């Protein structure tokens, strides 16, 4: 099974911030409005919890792995709230890849306006589309169709043999009708054709329906993380 480090490297490379720099043991990011994942600071072994507020005066936010227990406790002691426990799932693309049914899924780059509209309705606006634009390496967006209607979209990019699936959004009226499953297996099919060995994705621990879909498909939990955010 793929290890956590490879998954975190792919997660970072395929959903990149606008700017990244290092200071006082912390890796800091300017997400340019692209959400927590591209805005959170991550820590090296010598990072100190008490330094983070001065380094991020506009809103201290840290992303932590399970082995960073001491730092996590220090941030909690300073009043940083626990937010969005998240799991990373992965599976070999060979185990997931299926050619999508006829006209049910298309890989398209750049995204069409209707895809941008679906993302926007799900809270994935222009700043997150800009994150996709910044991603290097092989990448694509997916357009999912059901009953002759565009019902969903997603984004996938590859880093070092790992394809990360991001921003899966299915219109509420069409959920639990197979579009997300088609996208998952179709993304693996696309990734396999690009030479990737693994398909991975991040999902919040609270998203039980999505986790059930991934587990039914044979994906396994390989890593986890959470955020600590200072009170505003």
Image (tube, helix red, strand yellow):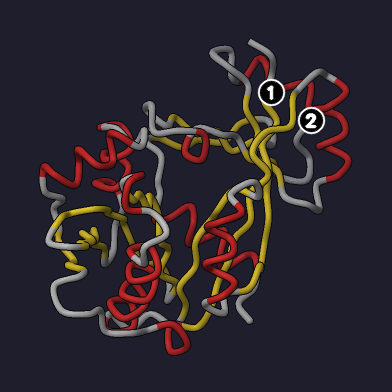
Mark 1 closeness class: few <14, some 14–19, many ≥20 residues within 10 Å: many
**Position of 112 compared to 33: left or right?**
left
Quadrant where the N terminus sits is: bottom right
For the image, the number of numbered tags is: 2
* Label 1 secondary element: helix
Quadrant where the C terminus sits is: top right
Disc 1 marks which residue? 52
Who's the residue at 25% across and 32% down the image?
126
Q: Which residue is farthest bottom?
A: 94
Who's the residue at 40% across and 35% down the image?
19
**Position of 75 compared to 15: left or right?**
right
Between residue 21 and residue 122, name the one nearer to us.
Answer: 122
Who's the residue at 19% across and 66% down the image?
107
Place of residue 221 in the rendered image (x, y in percent of width and height, measured from the top left): 66, 67
Mark 2 closeness class: few <14, some 14–19, many ≥20 residues within 10 Å: some
Q: Splitting the image into 4 quarters, where does residue 146 fall?
A: bottom left
* Label 2 secondary element: loop
Q: Splitting the image into 4 quarters, where does residue 96 fall?
A: bottom left
Residue 48 numbered tag? 2
Between residue 51 and residue 76, name the one nearer to us.
Answer: 76
Place of residue 113 in the rendered image (x, y in percent of width and height, measured from the top left): 11, 42
Who's the residue at 50% across and 83% down the image?
92
Place of residue 83 in the rendered image (x, y in percent of width and height, measured from the top left): 67, 33
> Would you say the residues marked 2 and 1 are in contact, meaning their CB atoms lie under 8 Å apart?
yes
């Amino acid at each position: 099974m793929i290890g956590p480090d490879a998954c975190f490297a792919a997660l970072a490379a395929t959903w990149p911030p606008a700017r990244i720099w290092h200071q006082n043991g912390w890796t800091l990011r300017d997400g340019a409005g692209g959400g927590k994942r591209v805005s959170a600071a991550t820590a090296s072994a010598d990072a100190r919890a008490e330094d983070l507020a001065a380094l991020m005066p506009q809103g201290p936010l840290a992303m932590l792995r399970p082995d960073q227990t001491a730092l996590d406790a220090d941030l909690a002691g300073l009043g940083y709230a626990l937010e969005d426990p998240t799991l990373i799932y992965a599976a070999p693309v060979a185990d997931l890849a299926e050619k999508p049914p006829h006209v049910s899924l298309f890989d398209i780059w750049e995204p069409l306006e209707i895809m941008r509209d679906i993302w926007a309705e799900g809270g994935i606006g222009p700043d997150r589309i800009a994150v996709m634009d910044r991603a290097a390496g092989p990448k694509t967006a997916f357009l999912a169709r059901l009953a002759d209607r565009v019902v969903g979209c997603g984004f996938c990019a590859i880093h070092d043999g790992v394809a990360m699936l991001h921003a899966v959004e299915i219109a509420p009226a069409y959920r639990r009708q197979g579009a997300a499953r088609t996208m998952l297996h179709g993304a693996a099919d696309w990734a396999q054709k690009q030479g990737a060995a693994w398909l991975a994705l991040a999902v919040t621990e609270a998203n039980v329906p999505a986790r059930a879909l991934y587990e039914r498909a044979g994906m396994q939990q390989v890593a986890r993380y959470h955020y600590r955010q200072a009170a505003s």
